[in-house]
Image: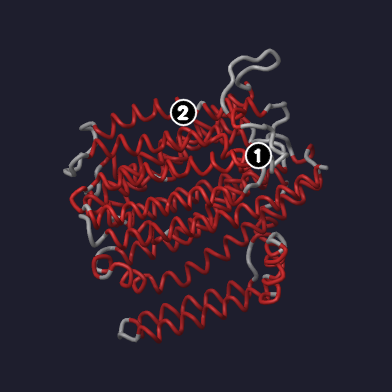
Amino acid sequence: ADEKDSKAALDGAARAASYNVVLQVIVRISSFALNGFILRYISGELLGVVNLRLTLLYTTLLFVSREALRRACFSKIEQQVSWQQRFNLLWCSVPVCVLASVLLGTLWLSRLLEQPSTGLYWVGVVSFSLSALIELIAEPLCMLGHSFHFSSLRILAEGLGQVFKVGAVVLGIVIFPNMGILVFCISQIIFSCTYVAVYFIYFNSQFRHKTAPQLPIATMKGIFPKFSYDKEPVLNPHLLTLSWSFLKQSLLKQLLTDGEKYVMTIFGILNFTQQGIYDVINNLGSLVARFIFQPIEESFYIFFSQTLKRGLPVEKQSEESVTLSLTTLTMLIKAVLWISLIILIFGFSYSHLALNIYGGKTLTDSDGPLLMKCYCIYVLALGINGITECFFFALMSKSEGDRYNRKLLWFSFIFLVSAILLTRILGSAGFILANCVNMITRIWNSCNFMLTFYKLTPQELVKKCQPSSNFLITCLMVFLLTVMSEMWLYASGHVFLHLIIGAGCGVLVLLITRSHEREMCHFFIERLPIRLQHIVKQFIL
């Protein structure tokens, strides 16, 4: 039964990851296109206020309010936990968000932070806080969707919300150009309302037509909190303890994840216009990395949580689950390395061209090309950290979590010092390099946990995870060739020849992958839907 459940969890995680990749493509491409559009209509200061200052408030509120509770509810623990207790715990995110909104909103509006000259800034703070609060209403339904592998539901909710949000921004800027920040406030509220509405409409339909009998509740009333129980406490004490441990991690992890934005906000190293340009480059530079790595990390965190029991050593785990989890983990790391190396070897030589097409001289005459090249290096560290840390978070015990919290304090200190020092030397690029330092320290911690859990030596782990030598040699040759092409052809105005060389090198890398990474290709193709498997096998294998 454990083996069957583990394989079902793996297939569900793979499907969820593929759907989430589609979702991230929609979200990132729409944001990408939206930024390219609004750059021509709004000031750099307003762009910095909305895309960095207010969006940072919104993401911080959501992260602090729900991240720890989500992880606790998804964890597979030895103690029995009822669904009602999980629902009750998730509803605690609402009062947490209210409290956090008051505290952070006061800070965002205080003179402790640099205040923009943009009118109605306080409306933006209130609107983005309200947006986060609205989204939390759908948390119990979101957990049901994840737990029972309704993989397409999230893409529908966030995708449709993003469509309405982008549409509202475009129409507002074109029709009411003088509304300024109000356009973004209204569009953000529209996104959150659409997100919640999709979840409630979908599950209401499921309950009404009884099309999902496997669900633990029969009506929509079942998701709401209940405060009177004879047989069990309202809040499970084990989940509460786990949530508190995760909350401490979440606060520090959020600081490390968006560290450069907090440094900009608190220390005012860059003005709002510079922050706006940096955010555009940040979104563009991490476009491919985030819409692939983030959904993989989210989906396989659930897989590892459901396959292995938290806090137990490998000897007390099911043998089939240990074998499956190790194979999955090493294949994920190898796949992430493959993606990251491709981004590095091509992104380094085509950054200037991409920025020139997207934003013109506004981006290419600034530090944009340097920022993009730094991001190509950062993507490598970002991808590896995402997979190794998702495994670590899924399995660590409470005591290990407490030790990790203490380590995060040191990681945060190292990041803060490196960010301040590197930005004074290199400007905006220092933020990206400081993030690389941050990721390396976290990778080191997660890999130590992996080696201890599976009882592997570093050499054994590297051998299992590294791509083939033929692929690595090909990557080095392609990198050198495209760099020379940029220096000689692109710099001389021969853009088309530069693109032809890049396309040819891309085909070469794919052919080498097909020949020398067949095990990795087989592993992921077998997790695709049956019809798609046949199509992919005809072209790849």
* Residue 113 horizontal/vertical position (percent): 24, 36
In the picture of the structure, the residue carrying the numbered disc 1 is 395
Q: Nearer the viewer, residue 207 or 195?
A: 207
Identify the residue shown where x is 29% and y is 45%. 264
In the figure, 371 relative to 476: above or below? above
* Residue 478 horizontal/vertical position (percent): 50, 78
Label 1 to label 2: alpha-carbon separation: 27 Å
Identify residue type, mark 2.
Answer: Val
In the figure, 430 relative to 539: above or below? above
* Residue 226 horizontal/vertical position (percent): 59, 20
Using a 10 Å C-alpha cutoff, classify the residue at mark 1 as few (fewer than 14 neighbours), some (14 to 19) or many (20 or more): many
Q: Is residue 241 left or right of residue 518?
A: left
Identify the residue shown where x is 49% and y is 81%. 503
In what element is the residue under mark 1?
A: helix
In the picture of the structure, the residue carrying the numbered disc 2 is 94
Which label was assigned to residue 158? none
- CB under 8 Å between discs 1 and 2: no
State which tag comes first along the sequence, 1 or 2: 2
* Residue 97 horizontal/vertical position (percent): 42, 30
